[in-house]
Protein backbone atom coordinates (compact mmCIF):
# COMPACT_ATOMS: atom_id res chain seq x y z
CA UNK A 1 0.00 0.00 0.00
CA UNK A 2 1.21 3.47 -0.82
CA UNK A 3 0.91 6.61 1.27
CA UNK A 4 -0.45 8.63 -1.64
CA UNK A 5 -0.85 12.32 -2.22
CA UNK A 6 -3.85 13.74 -4.02
CA UNK A 7 -4.59 11.62 -7.07
CA UNK A 8 -6.42 12.69 -10.20
CA UNK A 9 -8.28 9.42 -10.87
CA UNK A 10 -9.01 6.30 -8.83
CA UNK A 11 -10.43 3.28 -10.67
CA UNK A 12 -12.57 1.50 -8.10
CA UNK A 13 -13.23 -2.08 -9.20
CA UNK A 14 -9.88 -2.38 -10.97
CA UNK A 15 -9.85 -6.18 -10.70
CA UNK A 16 -13.12 -6.69 -12.59
CA UNK A 17 -13.42 -6.99 -16.36
CA UNK A 18 -14.26 -3.36 -17.08
CA UNK A 19 -11.99 -1.96 -14.38
CA UNK A 20 -9.10 -3.91 -15.81
CA UNK A 21 -9.76 -2.48 -19.29
CA UNK A 22 -9.82 1.04 -17.86
CA UNK A 23 -6.54 0.49 -15.98
CA UNK A 24 -4.93 -0.91 -19.11
CA UNK A 25 -6.02 2.20 -21.01
CA UNK A 26 -4.86 4.63 -18.31
CA UNK A 27 -1.53 2.86 -18.12
CA UNK A 28 -1.07 3.14 -21.86
CA UNK A 29 -2.00 6.84 -21.82
CA UNK A 30 -0.33 8.02 -18.62
CA UNK A 31 1.71 5.28 -16.94
CA UNK A 32 3.67 6.74 -14.05
CA UNK A 33 4.75 10.34 -14.27
CA UNK A 34 2.27 11.25 -16.97
CA UNK A 35 -0.12 14.16 -16.93
CA UNK A 36 -2.42 12.45 -14.43
CA UNK A 37 -1.77 10.61 -11.17
CA UNK A 38 -4.02 7.58 -11.00
CA UNK A 39 -4.53 4.54 -8.80
CA UNK A 40 -6.13 1.14 -8.86
CA UNK A 41 -8.63 0.28 -6.12
CA UNK A 42 -10.56 -2.77 -5.04
CA UNK A 43 -11.30 -5.14 -2.16
CA UNK A 44 -8.23 -7.34 -2.38
CA UNK A 45 -4.60 -6.23 -2.37
CA UNK A 46 -3.45 -9.57 -3.80
CA UNK A 47 -5.90 -9.30 -6.73
CA UNK A 48 -4.87 -5.68 -7.37
CA UNK A 49 -1.22 -6.75 -7.41
CA UNK A 50 -2.03 -9.66 -9.74
CA UNK A 51 -3.84 -7.42 -12.25
CA UNK A 52 -1.12 -4.77 -12.03
CA UNK A 53 1.51 -7.41 -12.78
CA UNK A 54 -0.49 -9.08 -15.58
CA UNK A 55 -0.95 -5.70 -17.29
CA UNK A 56 2.71 -4.74 -16.73
CA UNK A 57 1.64 -1.63 -14.83
CA UNK A 58 4.44 0.13 -12.98
CA UNK A 59 4.55 -0.91 -9.29
CA UNK A 60 4.61 2.79 -8.38
CA UNK A 61 0.95 3.09 -9.39
CA UNK A 62 -0.83 3.17 -6.01
CA UNK A 63 -3.08 0.30 -4.98
CA UNK A 64 -5.95 1.21 -2.66
CA UNK A 65 -7.84 -1.42 -0.71
CA UNK A 66 -11.42 -0.47 0.07
CA UNK A 67 -14.49 -2.61 0.55
CA UNK A 68 -17.94 -1.09 0.10
CA UNK A 69 -18.84 -2.35 3.59
CA UNK A 70 -15.97 -0.34 5.15
CA UNK A 71 -17.12 3.28 5.42
CA UNK A 72 -13.76 4.57 6.70
CA UNK A 73 -11.85 2.92 3.84
CA UNK A 74 -14.32 4.37 1.31
CA UNK A 75 -13.97 7.85 2.79
CA UNK A 76 -10.17 7.61 2.76
CA UNK A 77 -10.19 6.44 -0.86
CA UNK A 78 -12.60 9.19 -1.95
CA UNK A 79 -10.61 11.89 -0.14
CA UNK A 80 -7.44 10.74 -1.91
CA UNK A 81 -8.63 11.70 -5.39
CA UNK A 82 -10.31 14.32 -7.53
CA UNK A 83 -12.31 11.75 -9.56
CA UNK A 84 -13.55 8.33 -8.55
CA UNK A 85 -14.44 6.08 -11.47
CA UNK A 86 -16.53 3.16 -10.21
CA UNK A 87 -17.04 -0.13 -11.99
CA UNK A 88 -18.33 -1.84 -8.84
CA UNK A 89 -21.82 -3.14 -9.51
CA UNK A 90 -24.56 -3.98 -9.13
CA UNK A 91 -24.66 -0.40 -7.97
CA UNK A 92 -27.86 -0.76 -5.95
CA UNK A 93 -25.95 -3.22 -3.75
CA UNK A 94 -22.41 -1.83 -3.79
CA UNK A 95 -22.64 1.77 -4.99
CA UNK A 96 -24.73 3.78 -2.54
CA UNK A 97 -22.05 4.40 0.09
CA UNK A 98 -19.55 5.29 -2.62
CA UNK A 99 -21.86 7.94 -4.07
CA UNK A 100 -22.58 9.23 -0.56
CA UNK A 101 -18.87 9.55 0.25
CA UNK A 102 -18.22 11.40 -3.01
CA UNK A 103 -21.21 13.71 -2.60
CA UNK A 104 -20.17 14.80 0.89
CA UNK A 105 -16.43 15.06 0.16
CA UNK A 106 -16.61 17.03 -3.09
CA UNK A 107 -15.03 14.22 -5.10
CA UNK A 108 -16.33 13.82 -8.65
CA UNK A 109 -17.93 10.43 -9.34
CA UNK A 110 -18.40 8.50 -12.61
CA UNK A 111 -19.84 5.07 -13.23
CA UNK A 112 -21.29 2.98 -16.04
CA UNK A 113 -24.49 2.11 -14.26
CA UNK A 114 -27.61 0.95 -16.05
CA UNK A 115 -29.89 0.98 -12.97
CA UNK A 116 -32.30 3.92 -13.34
CA UNK A 117 -34.24 3.36 -10.10
CA UNK A 118 -31.01 3.36 -8.09
CA UNK A 119 -29.79 6.50 -9.88
CA UNK A 120 -33.07 8.26 -9.04
CA UNK A 121 -32.69 7.24 -5.40
CA UNK A 122 -29.11 8.54 -5.27
CA UNK A 123 -30.15 11.87 -6.81
CA UNK A 124 -32.95 12.26 -4.29
CA UNK A 125 -30.63 11.42 -1.36
CA UNK A 126 -27.39 13.17 -2.32
CA UNK A 127 -28.11 15.94 -4.82
CA UNK A 128 -28.07 18.67 -2.16
CA UNK A 129 -24.85 17.36 -0.59
CA UNK A 130 -23.16 17.15 -3.99
CA UNK A 131 -24.22 20.68 -4.90
CA UNK A 132 -22.98 21.93 -1.54
CA UNK A 133 -19.58 20.18 -1.79
CA UNK A 134 -19.11 20.80 -5.52
CA UNK A 135 -19.06 17.09 -6.37
CA UNK A 136 -20.20 16.18 -9.86
CA UNK A 137 -22.02 12.85 -9.84
CA UNK A 138 -22.27 11.34 -13.34
CA UNK A 139 -24.15 8.07 -13.74
CA UNK A 140 -24.17 5.88 -16.86
CA UNK A 141 -21.02 7.38 -18.26
CA UNK A 142 -20.22 4.53 -20.60
CA UNK A 143 -21.07 1.06 -21.70
CA UNK A 144 -24.38 0.31 -19.97
CA UNK A 145 -25.91 3.58 -21.11
CA UNK A 146 -25.18 3.12 -24.82
CA UNK A 147 -28.04 0.66 -25.57
CA UNK A 148 -30.54 3.00 -23.87
CA UNK A 149 -29.17 6.05 -25.66
CA UNK A 150 -29.40 4.24 -29.00
CA UNK A 151 -32.98 3.26 -28.17
CA UNK A 152 -33.89 6.88 -27.48
CA UNK A 153 -32.14 7.96 -30.68
Image (cartoon, grey):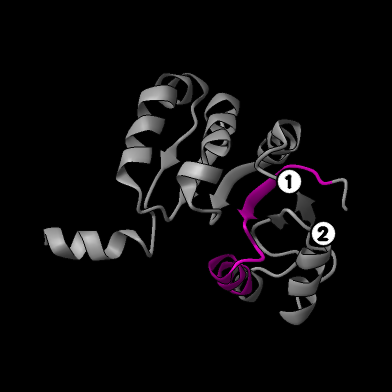
Q: Secondary structure at mark 1?
A: loop
From mark 2 to mark 1, how far is it between C-alphas? 9 Å
Residue 6 left/right relative to 146: right
Q: Residue 23's image quarter?
A: bottom right
For disc 1, the neighbor class at 10 Å (few under 14, some 14 to 19, many from 20) is many
Residue 98 left/right relative to 91: right
Q: Residue at x 40, y 44 (%)?
A: 138
Q: Secondary structure at mark 2?
A: helix
Q: Residue 60's image quarter?
A: bottom right
Residue of label 2: 45
Residue 139 left/right relative to 5: left
**Quadrant of the frame with the C terminus:** bottom left
Q: Nearer the viewer, residue 21 or 7?
A: 21
Residue of label 1: 66
Q: Earlier in the sequence, mark 2 or mark 1?
A: 2
Q: Residue at x 88, y 53 (%)?
A: 1
Magenta-colored span: 4-25
Residue 13: % across, % down: 62, 58
Q: Residue 119's image quarter?
A: top left
Residue 6 colored in magenta in the image: yes
Q: Residue furthest front?
A: 93
Residue 8 colored in magenta in the image: yes
Q: In the rendered image of this protein, does residue 151 appear above or below residue 132?
A: below
Q: How many marks?
A: 2
Residue 66: % across, % down: 73, 46
Q: Residue at x 68, y 38 (%)?
A: 69
Amino acid sequence: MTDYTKLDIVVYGATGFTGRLICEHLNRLYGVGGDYKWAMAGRSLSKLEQIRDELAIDPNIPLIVADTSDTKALEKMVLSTKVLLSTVGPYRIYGSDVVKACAYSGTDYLDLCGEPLWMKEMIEKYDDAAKSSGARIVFSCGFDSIPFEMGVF
